[in-house]
Amino acid sequence: MLVCALAFSLLHSAFVSASTKLPLPPGIPATNSDTEKYLLRQISEYAGEERAEALWRLAGFYLQETARRDLAIELLNLIIEQSVSRERTAVCCAALGQMAEDIENWELAIAHYRTGLAIGPSDVTTVYFL
C-alpha cells in the first residue's frame, strides 16, 4: 500500500488534459465524506485536465482513505478509457501495476507495466515506475 501511495504522489505531475466525460462507475458515491463530495462536485463541473485531476484524486482517496481498491481501479480504468494522452495512460498503468503488486498478483502487475511501457511514455518518472 505504501508503494502505491508513493506512486500516486510521484506520478501525479504527469497528468495532461482529458477530452471525454464518461459516467462514473457504479458504487460512487461510496461514502458521505466531505472530501468525496468535493471531488465529485469537481468531476461534474470540470472537463479536460481538471476533470482528469479530480478523477485521479478521487481514485487516490478511495485507495488510501477508504480501502476501496475496487473503486480506485474502476476510476483508473475510466481515466485510461477517456484519455487522449499516452503519458496519462502510462501513469494509470503504473498505478494499476503497483496496486496489483500490493495484493501480490505478479502476473497482473507485469501485464500493467508492459502495457504502460508499450505506450512509450516520455516522462522519466513514469518510465521508472513502469
Image (tube, rainbow, N blue to C red):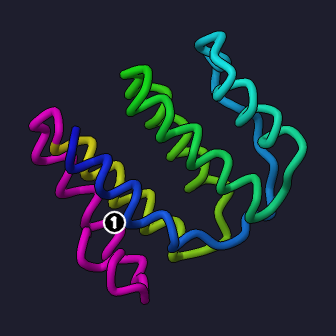
Callout 1: SS: helix
Q: Return the residue at label 1.
A: 115
Q: Position of residue 41 (x, y in %)?
A: 82, 34
Range of residues picked out in magenta: 102-130
Instruction: Tell me which residue sits at (52%, 45%) in the image.
Output: 77
Quadrant including the N terminus: top left
Q: Position of residue 3 (x, y in %)?
A: 21, 50
Quadrant hosting residue 120: bottom left
The secondary structure that most of the magenta stretch takes on is helix
Instruction: Tell me which residue sits at (80%, 56%) in the image.
Output: 20
Quadrant including the C terminus: bottom left
Residue 41 shown left or right of residue 119 in the figure = right
Residue 27 shown left or right of residue 4 in the figure = right
Q: Position of residue 97 (x, y in %)?
A: 26, 52
- State whether residue 73 is above or below residue 69: below
Amino acid under disc 1: Thr
